[in-house]
Image: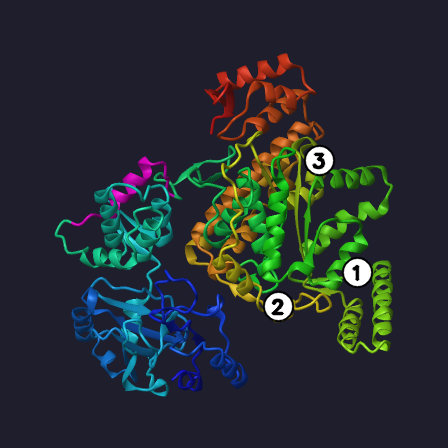
Amino acid sequence: MHREFIDAGFRVIGLHPIVNDKCGCGNDNCHMAGKHPWSANWQYAPHWSDEQLETMELSGQFSTGYGVLVSGLLVIDIDPRNGGNEGYAALVDQFPDITGSGLIVATGRGDGGKHIYFRLFEPLALVTKLSKYPGVDFKSAGFVVGPGSQHISGGEYTVLHGAPDDIDEAPQALLDALKKPERHRNDINGSSVDVSHAEIADMLGYLDPDCGYDDWVTAGMAIHHATDGTGFDLWDTWSNGSDKYPGKAKLGQHWHSFGKSANPVTLGTLWHRAKEAGWRPAIADDGLADYWGKPVALDISGIDLTKPPGFVGEVTEWINSQCRYPRERLATGAALVTVGNVIGLNYIDKKDGVTGNLFVFGVADSGSGKNAVLTAASDLHVEAGLAPAVHGSIKSEQEIVSNLVRNQAALYLIDEIGEGLAKIESARKRGGAIYLEGIYGMLMSAYSQGAGRLLLSGDKRDDVRKAIQAEIAQANKRLDEGKREYNEVIAALESRLASLDQGLVRPFLSVYGTGEPRKFEPMVNYDSATSGFFSRALIFSERVLVPSRKRDFTKPPMCERIAQRLKMLAATGTHDSFYKRIENYAAPTPIPTEPEAARLLEEIADIFEEYAHDQAERTGLHSVVVRGYESVSKVSFILAAPSRLRTAEHVLWAYALVKNDIDDKLRLVVASDTGPGSSKKAGLVSRIEAQINSDEGQTIGVIKNRLRDFKPEDIERELAKMVEAKRAETFKGARSMRYRLVR
């Protein structure tokens, strides 16, 4: 029947056949026989042509069954083994319209299980379970095995009523009941609090799923009560981190038994356990805290800057998994640049109009695994299909333009960028090597025109025009040799040539560079900070000098989820050969912002504005602060784009990151002793703060070694003063006494 679904406008996928009571995939231990897609990319199955279908049929992809993508569908899955008959009867009592479905299929097990099909005419975020109806699942994503398919038990999926053409629209009352609530009202310590699924997931991240059975069940009961029975996936995901994970079916049995007690376990239990384990609410109980003196800001003390929320966090974990030595901060920066670059051509922020391109610098000592991070970022771009847009160096202003002409997107992954920037800075100061000096200006111009048009000066146009004309001449020679495919190459090159006079439309430029502290940190001085280049950049510094290597280290392959998500995010651009530009001139998809996130952004804008005024009066370093809001908007947009909605969680994490970045920059600038009103003493104190600004702290020996411009006795004296004033504290490290800032 797979062609009937196709004719009705639905998509189907091939499944590995059942062969001798086993899955035809070749894995004798496969537990998905008859339910196992042929393609790893089955989520993106197109509407097959007749020729493609014939090929798939001949190859055996539909020999014992097929899957129907649940895209544009809501399928009610009734499982009698888990009380589905009773659950369905209760569902019919509440929603009698569901009995009028145009297609009902008996599942192949032969125990009374059913699939009831309805149409969805718009994508909706729906829950998969309702506690009132045990044994009933509501599927609006993934796939179901289609009628006519065989079951491993020997039965067959059989049509009981109707046909694919007859599938009716889902009853609105049922859809209203299934819509995922954004937040749930809960009582915590006598106060009424709105809690999101993301915040509950954050709490669970602090609790060990390998706890005792009673604690595990208690967590499930608390989640059930807090989410009105819609949070099964939260409990399942957390439980899956345990070696004792019993499987989704067993969890479902427990889940359906919850909510029947007169004295239920509430979210308060989970809340207190998480706080005891170190979790802190995104917004603290007292709401506000002092910030940089005059301004007031949100409390972000509980946010981990090495664990971005959502898909960016998954990418961060994978990049770090490729490193023999933990490089969490570098991995975070690389993940932000990567996801920002992949989405860049296809998405735009609806609120502020920002794009996802970033300047990011990763700072760590030599031999600490920086190259592994660069390689991982490159691999991610290759997987997304964006390899032609990745470059390993910046040679000149003209080269930047040429790369953007060749590909609408450009990402520079540069090792030891501090040395290159030092050359550029030296050229700028002495007025020589203009070709290097112009790199600053072109980087900033291209960076700021991600959603606009980059106009080129006459000499730049002429230089690039000559280069393209030379390529066209070479392509014509190949054409004369009978290589007809070069017609396409010539057409692409001529199109680029024509675009030069109108300017480059939506050029998208990102930079991720790594460097050593001793070479990079002196570059962040008063002149560079106030020029705008470093104020636009985000700096991620590793604090651990000698990281402990991972035992029995092996690089895991890229998981299918990340690979497919990258492809999906980059899918609307063209990137099928070197000569076809990586481009997207279609209108980018706007990413909306939820009301609470919009309120937080406005509050953050006020914070940075007030602080910029304060810095303008006291230090002249307002330019380091003034772009703070733009950075928060960009970073939160990147976090939000994969899920298509910016939330308060995205904004708070971005704010914490940018605040920390600005704090570090101000310390580095003051430490450089080049700004108006600076002093040697202030520079020393700031340099010390920069060295001990982490939970790991630093030893006195390392501090003295890194601050060799200062006398050891002066360093010791200022450290003692800082400890006495409670600006710093000492603690016992693994081998010796260490210093760290008091937060």
> Is residue 133 among the parts visible in the rendering?
no
Between 343 and 60, which is closer to the camera in this rendering? 60
Question: Which range is magenta?
Answer: 264-281
Which quadrant would the N terminus be assigned to in this image? Answer: bottom left
> For this view, does 444 lie left or right of residue 220?
right
Q: CA distance from mark 2 to mark 3?
A: 37 Å
Q: Secondary structure at mark 1?
A: loop
Up-down: is 276 above or below 166?
Answer: above
Q: Secondary structure at mark 2?
A: loop
| Mark 2 or 3, closer to the camera | 2
Q: Residue at x 87, y 70 (%)?
A: 473
Q: Is residue 443 magenta?
A: no
Up-down: is 175 above or below 207?
Answer: below
Q: Is residue 275 magenta?
A: yes
Q: Earlier in the sequence, mark 1 or mark 3?
A: 1
Q: What residue does disc 2 label?
A: 573
Between 524 and 691, which is closer to the camera in this rendering? 691
Q: What residue does disc 3 label?
A: 523
Q: Residue at x 35, y 74 (%)?
A: 145
Q: Residue at x 75, y 63 (%)?
A: 405
Name which quarter of the figure residue 509 lies in.
Answer: bottom right
Q: CA distance from mark 1 to mark 3?
A: 28 Å
Q: What residue does disc 1 label?
A: 456
The amino acid type, in three-letter code, at marker 3 is: Met
Q: Earlier in the sequence, mark 2 or mark 1?
A: 1
Q: Earlier in the sequence, mark 2 or mark 3?
A: 3
| Mark 1 or 3, closer to the camera | 3
